[in-house]
Image (tube, grey):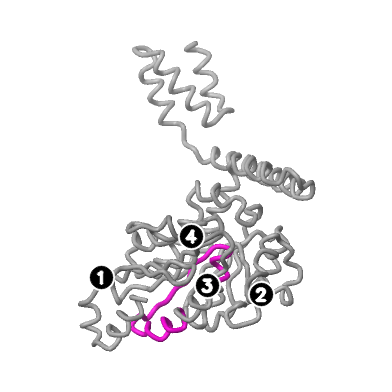
Amino acid sequence: MKLLYWLDEWVSLSRGEQQAKLPVSGGDLIGDVFVKYNFVDLTKPLLFTFSPAGTNIQQHDLHADFAPWGYHLAQKQQVNIIAFQHLGKSNWFRNRNLIFFIEQLATLLSPFHTKLGYGLSRGGFAVGAFAKLLQLDQVLLFHPVSTKNQQLVPWDDRSSTQFAQQFDWQSDYADLDLGDARGYIIYDPTNKIDRLHAKRYPQLTHLRVFGMGHGTHASYLNKFGFYKQVAVDFIRHQQIDIAQFRLQTKTLRLKEEYYQSLNKANVNSAHRLALLSTAHKILTDEKEQHVQEHQAKIDIQPLIDVALKHQDAHPNDAIQLLEVAQQLVPDDPLVELKLKQLE
């Protein structure tokens, strides 16, 4: 537990001496979780990340340059980071040694004035469960999981819930406990289990993204930088520009690839496919209206002027310019007339 020993000495120094000791980085193996930290500046936030399912690292995969989930993101934003990477497939951060470590860690973080938590699904559970203990100020959670205690969430019948029953869900830190933390929870409201988990976080701002599922499309959404951009805004400003978020999700939904991916992922659910079909039609209509509104604002007169100026010396170039103008505004009578004359 090198981190605890270092923090115990460091926290007793004056603030100036603390800053002079930075940057510092390192890693610890705590039970079945690898912890990597990087402290760079006392004036910057301290970010906690917990890895989601699907990042099934084994102990033999660890090496000097290994970076847990979220670690590089924090480095790029030049904030302080403590990243928790679970080892193995079925791991819900319930190891007693890890819990003891976090309890000790929480007492040594007073020099950091702003503490943030970020996690997806399983990682989001851990952020919520340890938020009060770590005195987090703001959290960002995707694909909510509040607990795997079946007495509290009897409607969560996922296979992951059954696998998770090998752990103790009755003792401390087995359910959400946000303390005074505020922030955001982002989920698909058509996913019943996610919606019910999200309801258990009333103090967070709920941002809904129809069709994003629960983890199924994580790699697809990541392809368009969806998670990264939202997380970057959260880390930099400790808030999300909701208007920009709405625009981003709308832009994503206007991509045909998005629906192709969703239809493929939900091929065995007639109900989900019907919902997606309805949503797709609505968005197709919106897209067509958006294009029409955009075209109405386009001024093609400069293209026409250049084409007319050079139509005698360079008729082929003039035709190409007019064809571009026609693509922008298909029903313009002047463009159509000039094209017929030149052709």
Q: Are marks 1 and 4 in contact (CB under 8 Å)?
A: no
Q: Residue under circle 3? A: 127
Image location (x, y in percent) of residue 329: 54, 31
Please state if 77 lies on the left or on the right of 325 as rendered. left
Q: Is residue 98 left or right of residue 281?
A: left
Alpha carbons under labels 2 and 4: distance apart: 22 Å
Instruction: Using the numbered discs, state the Cα–Cα distance from disc 1 to disc 4 in whole angstroms.
Output: 26 Å
**Residue 199, how many percent across, how many down?**
68, 72
Spatial separation of the CA atoms under disc 2 and disc 1: 38 Å
For disc 3, the neighbor class at 10 Å (few under 14, some 14 to 19, many from 20) is many
Q: Residue at x 60, y 55 (%)?
A: 215
Numbered label attached to residue 200: 2
Decide which of 296, 229 is in the foreground and name it.
229
Label 1 sits on residue: 23
Magenta span of residues: 102-127
Tag 1–tag 3 contact (CB < 8 Å): no
Q: Nearer the viewer, residue 135 or 59?
A: 59
Among the two numbered marks 1 and 4 on one chain, the one whose residue lies closer to the N terminus = 1
Q: Earlier in the sequence, mark 1 or mark 3?
A: 1
User: For the point 71% across and 61% down, which residue is it?
Assistant: 158
Give SS at disc 3: helix
Q: Find residue 80 and report its horizontal and vertical position in percent.
A: 35, 70
- Tag 1: amino acid: Pro
The quadrant of the rendering that contains the N terminus is bottom left
Q: Nearer the observer, disc 2 or disc 3?
A: 3
